[in-house]
Amino acid sequence: MADTEVLFTAEEVAERLRVAPQTVHQWRRDGRIPAIEITPRTFRFSYGQILAVLRGQSRRAEGAAGDREGQP
């Protein structure tokens, strides 16, 4: 992460991804997206890192679906 990268709150990430802030927090607790812990109850997120993770998950899901094509 670059030193000058802007960090977002869960609410800001949720707005950009069009999900509820609770979803962002759940993804963080589940380890699905990276977060930076500021205090035990305050987290910030790198939007670029989140997009990279979500894009990677999407590609893996597409690949798995393609692997099943043509199978009974």
Image (tube, grey):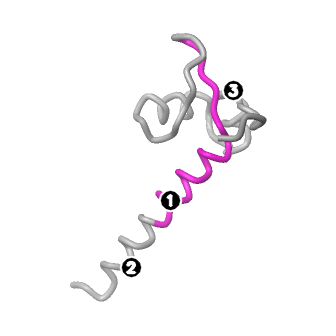
What residue is rendered at 69% in x and 26% in y? 9
* Residue found farthest to the bottom: 70
Vertical comparison of 31 with 48: above or below = above
Whole-number angstrom distance, CA of label 2 to CA of label 3: 35 Å
| Amino acid at the residue labelled 3 | Thr
Whole-number angstrom distance, CA of label 1 to CA of label 3: 22 Å
Look at the image and give the residue range highlighted in magenta: 41-59
Give the side of residue 42 with respect to residue 28, left or right. Answer: right
SS at mark 3 in the image: loop
**Contact check, label 1 and label 2, Cβ < 8 Å:** no
Q: Name the residue under label 1.
A: 56
Vertical comparison of 64 with 43: above or below = below
* Residue found farthest to the left: 72
Q: Mark 3 points at which residue?
A: 9
Report the mark closest to the observer, 1 or 2: 1
Dot 2, how many residues are within 10 Å of its Cα: few (below 14), some (14-19), or many (20+)?
A: few
